[in-house]
Amino acid sequence: MATRQGASLDRKKLMADPIMVSTIVVLIAFLTLFILYPLAILLVDSFVSDSGLTLDVFKRIFKIPTFKTAITNTLKVGFLVGIISTAVGLLFAYVEVYVRSNKFMGGLFKVVSMLPVVSPPFVLSLSMIMLFGKAGIITRHLLGIYDNSVYGFWGIAIVQSMTFFPVCYMMFRGLLKNIDPSLEEAARDMGASRSKVFTSVTLPLLLPGIGNAFLVTFIESIADFANPMIIGGSYDTLATTIYLQITGAYDKPGAAAMAVVLLCITLLMFAVQKYYLEAKSTATLTGKASRQRMLIEDKSVRLPLTILCGAIALFVIIMYICVPIGALFPTWGYTFFPLTTKWFQLIFTRYKGFKAFKDSFMLSVIAAPITALLSMIISYLVVKRKFKGKGFIEAVSMLAMAVPGTVLGVGYIRGFSGGVFHTGFLQGLYGTGAILVIVFIVRSLPTGTRSGIAALRQIDKSIEESAYDMGANSMKVFTTVTLPLIKDSFLSGLVTAFVRSITAISAIILLVTPQFLLITVQINEFAEKGSYGLACAFATLLIAVTYTAVALMNLFIKHFGTSRKIKEEY
Amino acid sequence: MKKEKKGIRLDHISKIYKDPKTGKDFYAVKDTSLEIEPGSFVTLLGPSGCGKTTTLRMIAGFESPDEGEIFLGNEAINELTPNKRDTAMVFQSYALLPHYNIFDNVAYGLKLRKVPKEEIKERVTRILELVELSGMEARMTNQLSGGQQQRVALARALVIEPSVLLFDEPLSNLDAKLRVSMRTEIRRIQQEVGITAVYVTHDQSEAMAISDKIIIMNKGVVAQMGTPHEIYYHPNSEFVADFIGEANFLKGKMISHDDKVAQIEVDGLPITVAYEKNMKEGNDYTVVLRPEAASLSEKGGVPCTVELSRFMGSYQNYHVRVGNTLVKLEEHNPKNKRIFEVGEKCTLVFEPTSVHVL
Ligand SMILES: Nc1ncnc2c1ncn2[C@@H]1O[C@H](COP(=O)(O)OP(=O)(O)OP(=O)(O)O)[C@@H](O)[C@H]1O
Ligand SMILES: [Mg+2]
């Protein structure tokens, strides 16, 4: 084949678009510096010493007995949580899609699906302790059990399962809705019983999806920091061990090596999930259902399933409500009446609640629009444009999804406390609000990008091409066509980023300096000290903020969402 | 339009893609050279996947040619991005901007060109009149019928007064009736504005009806370029003959000739065709016979046997066997003609000049 000028022409055309070029350059620099570099420095730190390449650090940390226990602990919890969340998620999805239900159940399901969006990570741990702990309302005051311990393996497993199963539920709901009902009806028609249809038709179709959901929760579980921190007690997981290695043992190289171990586990899971299961679980189930499904009316199936789901949903919801109520008890676990607002007064008067609120709020408010815009730009570039480096941008922003916050936090400490590569370059960044904002951005970018990509894929490529053809440059196309068309997705990305930022803790707790008071860090601190009243008051404040943000967004989309009008057509 | 018309020239253009399955490179368009005259209406016609869209997108600038150079007028435009090219494209899916109303859709290109507000209003109004959409300025795109949306797309492309209009199967989403009236409309407007137009379709009657010239493409290469008449009556290959309209191919050797006619022996039967100077005795030729160019008779012509005889309304449809070759015929206006039945022996009659020899 003769010389190819196509690629070089494409490059020249790209170069003729300076805004686009600088956007790409800035993006690549950002992703490299704030995602790849901190991870790379972890590897460098743990493999390189003064005498060159070495495994010494790893040898050392694997001699620490608590570290080895932490690995098994983490995997054990992850495994169990993966199984429970997947099973409960599947149950919920099945009941919603297959079983006729009433308005009340529908409402419950809706609330459950909303929870992962608005809930701060440790809320369930707090209410778990409040209900079932040594001085728990249920264990001690209702059942009279005085020595029940919620701390440890089961505590973490139950709390995490309750936190993550709604994610599985949403995944399965999408999958089940796409199964063509006639497949199952055909089996029914040939005489298979309802349970036989489920095990012989529905389940096999879902198998890749089940693996997918399991791994997603598995990753979430082993990356989770907040719950093990509060309810783990002496049961340490990798995330908490790494944290303690830094804050307790002041062993930064050791923590870096541990972070590498944790990262390897999540990356491995992520790779399997992303490249093997995700493709499979959608490929087998594409296409919309052709007809409405016949819902299950049969009482002997309907009642037990509905009751089971309803009970679980109610239980989870009660757990959430416990936190604001717990903030009103005069003495946590001992005197419940009269309800008092003293904790709220205390956090504002003595514990700088207002500053915590302000700091958390401000940093998140700065991070959210940047995150939302960045993820839309990345999605636009990935879906609509072709250029060298696109693969890099897509891969790195997705990679961030597999990086546990704790690992990122350690990477930032190692990577930026002495400047980039310990040269002092950008050293000023460390300890500032800016680096906190950057961590917020990096932590929310993958979710935003993923939903942005999904939204953009639905928009016919030729709409943007036509604008380009009419004479608009890339910037104009993005602002006058792309962005208005994905306004809703942008808005929900904005709110999600805000909520994720204001509720974030795992990475941020390692990086925050006394100059900033963050609500999540405060909750963690008070819960650690056993001041659950204060922790609950802070958590209530947080829930109020996140819930307001989500409610405002829904209101806004309902009234101003132009995309709704457009969607009717496309 | 006061603007000077511009033609398009493709100079040895190729586009190479990677086959996603095998990972191998292949030519979607191969070494294509074309000259499209200013103000003419040219149609790219060919089977699915032959590279029509790719060619059009290279002219618009969405794809970059891997070999060759594209000229707009006298200017080489390879390095220009689509927004810098003086072309406007009408997309198959219309690609209207769904968040704008009709007026804003049409005005979009003018606003980008920083045309003063009054002038925008004036030009948009004028162009909407031309496409007969006056009074619909405030509607959203989803409040229009398919044909109306199509006309908005056309108006939007016309209003910026490009040198070249590009159409990629603009009518394929419309029903058959509307397609016919819209193609007449497009032709009328193109004539009125006098703009150069490149039109992609795989509907041959559409191509015949509106084009000054038709370019037949096959597997990435131009098979033939010519007026509809040339393409139909003087196809340069079996592919073109077969692709445009129906054609029967009778293969044989030339056995003799005089100044006017030549004899070609097909399966032992001599067939008389018009003689052309470059034909030589002993060579192999293919006679292209259009179904409507011959009729059946009781004597004279080439002997044949009827294998199918079917009344189709406006014509009688025959399949007859000539030697070993099956020939399809359409005898038009059959009411007062003798109808031959299956199994009958008869003869195939046609003028030597009404067949084409390859
Ligand atoms: N982006 C691409 N990557 C790889 N192959 C492509 C790409 N775009 C087109 N092709 C291939 O190039 C060939 C020509 O495609 P093109 O779209 O030009 O066909 P077409 O003539 O417009 O066909 P149709 O009438 O079906 O629209 C096809 O084989 C097609 O599969
Ligand atoms: Mg095409």
Image: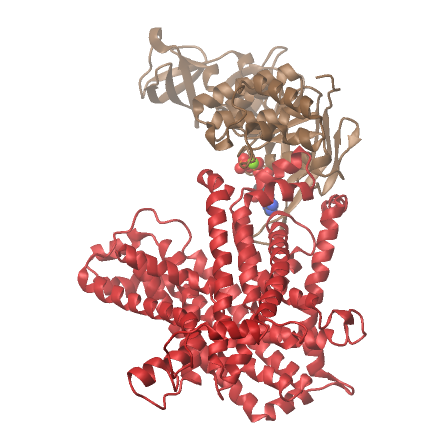
Chain colours: A red, B brown
Q: Position of residue A476 (x, y in %)?
A: 67, 41
Residue situated in front as seen by the camera: B3 or A88:
A88
**Does A15 appear above or below B262?**
below
- Let me know if residue A509 appears in the view: yes
Q: Position of residue B239 (x, y in %)?
A: 56, 30
Quarter of the image for residue B336 reads top left
Q: Quadrant of ligand 2?
A: top right
Q: Position of residue B185 (x, y in %)?
A: 54, 18
- Let me know if residue B219 appears in the view: no
Q: Is residue A472 left or right of residue A194?
A: right
Q: Position of residue B246 (x, y in %)?
A: 48, 24
As drawn, which residue projects farthest toward the top?
A: B336
**Does B164 appear above or below A263?**
above
Number of numbered discs overlaid on the protein picture: 0
Quarter of the image for residue A132 reads bottom left
Residue situated in front as seen by the camera: B211 or B90:
B90
Residue situated in front as seen by the camera: A522 or B150:
A522
**Does B35 appear above or below A520?**
above
Residue shown at 40% from the left, 84% from the top: A150
**Does B244 appear above or below A326?**
above
